[in-house]
Amino acid sequence: MKKDSECEQTLSIYPSSNLNQVCLIESNEEGFSRFASGTVLNNGEIRTSDRRFIICRENYLGIAGVYNGQPFVGGDIPLTNPRPLFVPSHTTLTTINESSEFENVVRQTLRQFKEAGCTASLPDSI
């Protein structure tokens, strides 16, 4: 379980009840951004359901992927500054944007979080 942030970007990584699975919630300065699930690989990296890799080195997280045939590296600098996780809820995911479209994204994220077996609690065994 980890929450890292840099400037306006936050990536929260939650454990799942499914073996070697994690759940990710990203947000930015405008509020919640997106949900993805991920598979923890043997080397500790995470491959996400939206075809990205989360790479952890010491206290830094990097995000990389391929979009439209072009390499993509998330952010200008790696994520750092780990913090305790928040429990995902309508209140914690709703910050600035209160539009109906945003409300639908929040509801969908909470549903996906639950369906993926995600939790904001520590797993029973590590």
Image: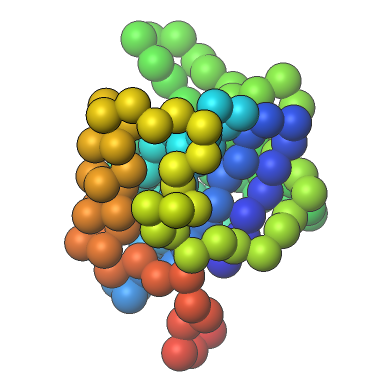
Going 21% across and 61% down the picture, which residue do you hit?
115
In the rendered view of the protein, which quadrant contains the N terminus? Answer: bottom right
Going 52% across and 32% down the picture, which residue do you hit?
96
Query: Percent x, y for residue 47?
Result: 42, 45
Query: Percent x, y for residue 28?
Result: 57, 31
The quadrant in which residue 67 appears is top left
Residue in the foreground of this view, choosing between 104 and 80: 104
Residue in the foreground of this view, choosing between 95 and 70: 95
Going 67% across and 30% down the picture, which residue do you hit?
8
Going 69% across and 42% down the picture, which residue do you hit?
5
Residue in the foreground of this view, choosing between 19 and 41: 19
User: As drawn, is 56 to the left or to the right of 70?
Assistant: right
* Vertical comparison of 15 with 122: above or below: above
User: As drawn, is 55 to the left or to the right of 41?
Assistant: right
Query: Percent x, y for residue 6?
Result: 73, 36
Residue in the foreground of this view, choosing between 96 and 87: 96
The quadrant in which residue 61 appears is top right
Query: Percent x, y for residue 66?
Result: 43, 20
User: As drawn, is 46 to the left or to the right of 18?
Assistant: right
* Vertical comparison of 52 with 4: above or below: above
The quadrant in which residue 70 appears is top left
Looking at the image, can residue 64 be seen?
Answer: no
